[in-house]
Image: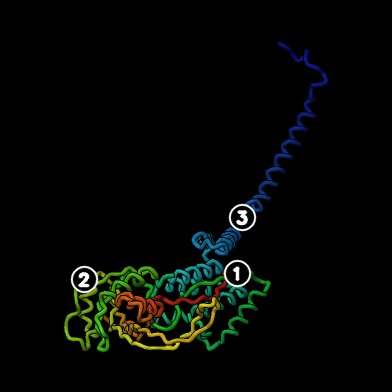
Amino acid sequence: MSSAHDLDPSRVVPEAAFARRRQISHSVLCLSTLAALVSLPACSTAPVDRSTNQTRSGVSAADRGFWEEAEFRWLKALAISQSNARALNNLAVRQERLAEFDTAKARYDDALQVAGPAERDYINWNYKQFSVIWERVNSGEIGNDDSEAASDDGDNGNDDSTQVIADELSALLLRTDLTALEVEIALPDEGGPNLAGFSRMLIGNFVQRRDSTANINGVAVPYLRRRITQRTFFQTQDQLGLPLEGPREGIFDDADYWVQRAEAAGADLILTGEIGVTTEDESKLVRRRMRGPDGEVREVAEFEDSVTYTVNFDYVLLRGEDGQRLLDGALEGSASFPSDQGVDDGAATAEALEQLVPQILQAITPQRTDQSRLLIY
């Protein structure tokens, strides 16, 4: 065991020097601790900054088409700072896009209450466009949850023209005091009730038109049902086994009768009306290119006999829950065939029906139009 006398004199620290070293070490430790405490706020993120970052991330997600992620980010931004007007505005745009108009209205109102001067102009521009939709909601013309679109005629509720709206938008996007992203959202178009809230449609039965040469329910009902199922979001049903009952006159105004029909089919819409087919023979001059005996191709004119099948459909669209009329109109489709082809009446009628299908789809499919909104970050 070594004693103090065995230690290397060069490694022995005098007591006074040791005291000074301990004092210096203590001072360094105190300074290091103080520096860490001073720098701590700089290493953490203030709530306002974190809320702003979440808002910006949400806009970035929406720009890439990830709207669910965007909504998550904006809700997170609000959880950090409830006075984040930008996140509130962006969520209002999101709710408009989902046709949740009551929630959108509340979000816009909250955003305007907490908005600063720079943000207010952007939010007001969005709200001005939304106000047209909100008026239609209050009037009952469209409802909340009219899923996946305002007027495209330039009327924004304040007698501004489309050009004025576009100029205002351009001026906002050129400003440098705030950054915004223009996005397109689809909203319910004007021009009749929006049918997006309905899902199941009863097709027929139809009343035979007085001028019809035949009862075409057996052809028209399944054909229209198939086309509507293929080309719209509606589920469809028919009641071919249940002929229409009661007097012909006024049958479409018998609400109780149609409510019973709708209940039996489990439908919330009924497409009915008067339908019929007429035929007309005609002979017309047609020109054809034909090869003669000498091999030369010549254009010749000759008369061709044909028959034209015309389907007239005076449609009525009823609401299943109360039998009330939502839409009505007159449609016509026709198809011509050479008389010598011997076309089957059913096939010819179906071809004529095909010509009026686009008209039916336009009438019953919710019309949408795109509008611009601003996401702020």
Q: Which quarter of the figure has residue 183?
A: bottom right
User: Disc number at residue 264?
Assistant: 2
Which quadrant holds residue 124?
bottom right
Q: Which residue is mark 3?
A: 45
Label 2, secondary structure: give it: helix
Between disc 2 and disc 3, whose residue precedes? 3
Front position in the image: 128 or 366: 366
Which amino acid does the dot numbered 3 rest on? Thr
Amino acid type, residue under disc 2 in the picture: Ala
How many residues crowd around disc 2 within 10 Å: few (fewer than 14), some, or many (20 or more)?
few
Q: Crowdedness of circle 3 by 10 Å Cα count: few (<14), some, many (20+)? A: few
Circle 3 SS class: loop
**Residue 339 horizontal/vertical position (percent):** 35, 81
Q: Is residue 116 left or right of residue 108?
A: right
Q: Nearer the viewer, mark 2 or mark 3?
A: 2
* Residue at the disc numbered 1: 181
Q: Residue at x 45, y 86 (%)?
A: 302
Left or right placement of residue 148 versus residue 118 in this view? left
Q: Nearer the viewer, mark 1 or mark 2?
A: 2
Q: Quadrant of residue 248?
A: bottom left
**What is the x, y in percent for residue 342?**
32, 77
Image location of residue 76, percent across then percent down: 51, 59
Mark 1 falls on what kind of element?
Answer: strand
Residue 244, position in %: x, y? Answer: 20, 79
Crowd around label 1: few <14 · some 14–19 · many ≥20 (10 Å): some
Question: Would you place residue 89 above or below residue 77 in this image?
Answer: below
